[in-house]
Image (cartoon, helix red, strand yellow):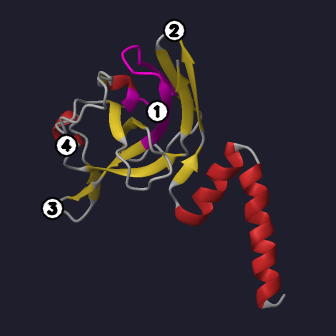
């Protein structure tokens, strides 16, 4: 293929993917940017948004899942705020307007794939959710071998990094 044919072909493929379901977009974003590694579902019911995901991370150094919320999904630098994590975070950021932070140790469990977030105090609007998978860094031991930091909350903020993130899912809050 020549240059213009490749561009037309790629443009058609991207346009087709944009018209496909969000799973296709998450997969495409994941291939291009490594940002969206998996898909999630989010559903509003009775003052709560339930966020679910099927992605199971590798067991090596897994620290936990974090749940993020924003009103600006298309802004790469938007204020995605952590609203749920396995441990309390020192960031002190509260998602406006007043979404209570959820500290839930179950988020560090490999088999935990769903959480309900209380959004009863959130004004009407569309909000977007993502799930991040966080892994502990490896520390080098005196003998030269490596092991994961595993001291729970003590090392979570200092020695854990985001490894994979879901695509976003929008939810209308009535």
Q: Mark 3 Cα within 10 Å, few/some/many (few <14, many 20+)? A: few
Residue extent of the magenta highlight? 107-132
Q: Nearer the viewer, mark 2 or mark 3?
A: 2
The residue pinned by badge 3 equals 142
Q: Which of marks 1 and 3 is in front?
A: 1
Q: Mark 2 Cα within 10 Å, few/some/many (few <14, many 20+)? A: few
Q: Which of marks 3 and 4 is in front?
A: 4
Give me the C-alpha separation between circle 4 and circle 1. Answer: 18 Å
The residue pinned by badge 1 equals 110
Residue occupying image coordinates x 55% and y 28%: 171
The reply to whether callout 4 and callout 2 are in contact (CB within 8 Å) is no
On residue 76, the disc is none
The reply to whether callout 4 and callout 1 are in contact (CB within 8 Å) is no
Give me the C-alpha separation between circle 3 and circle 4. Answer: 19 Å
Name which of mark 3 and mark 4 comes first in the sequence. Answer: 3
The residue pinned by badge 2 equals 46
The residue pinned by badge 4 equals 155
Name which of mark 4 and mark 2 comes first in the sequence. Answer: 2
Residue 111 covered by magenta stretch: yes
Give me the C-alpha separation between circle 2 and circle 1. Answer: 28 Å
- How many numbered discs? 4
Name which of mark 2 and mark 1 comes first in the sequence. Answer: 2
- Residue 142 placement: quadrant: bottom left
Image coordinates of residue 122 in percent, x first then y, are 39, 21
Return the residue nearer the eye: 38 or 7: 7
Q: Mark 1 Cα within 10 Å, few/some/many (few <14, many 20+)? A: some
Give me the C-alpha separation between circle 1 and circle 3. Answer: 30 Å
Instruction: Describe the element under mark 3 as helix, strand or loop.
Output: loop
Residue 146 covered by magenta stretch: no
The reply to whether callout 2 and callout 1 are in contact (CB within 8 Å) is no
């Amino acid at each position: 293929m020549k240059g213009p044919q490749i561009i037309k072909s790629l443009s058609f493929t991207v346009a087709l993917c944009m018209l496909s379901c969000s799973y296709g977009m998450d997969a495409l974003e994941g291939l291009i940017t490594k940002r969206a590694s998996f898909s999630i579902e989010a559903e509003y019911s009775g003052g709560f948004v339930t966020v679910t995901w099927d992605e199971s991370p590798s067991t090596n150094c897994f620290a936990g899942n974090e749940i993020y919320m924003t009103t600006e999904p298309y802004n790469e630098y938007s204020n995605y705020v952590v609203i749920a994590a396995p441990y309390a975070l020192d960031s002190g950021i509260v998602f406006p307007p007043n979404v209570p932070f959820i500290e839930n140790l179950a988020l560090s469990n490999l088999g935990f794939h769903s959480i309900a977030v209380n959004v009863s105090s959130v004004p009407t609007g569309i909000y977007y959710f993502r799930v991040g998978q966080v892994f502990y860094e490896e520390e080098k031991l005196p003998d030269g071998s490596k092991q994961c930091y595993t001291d729970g909350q003590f090392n979570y903020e200092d020695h854990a990094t985001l490894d994979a993130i879901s695509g976003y899912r929008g939810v209308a809050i009535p």
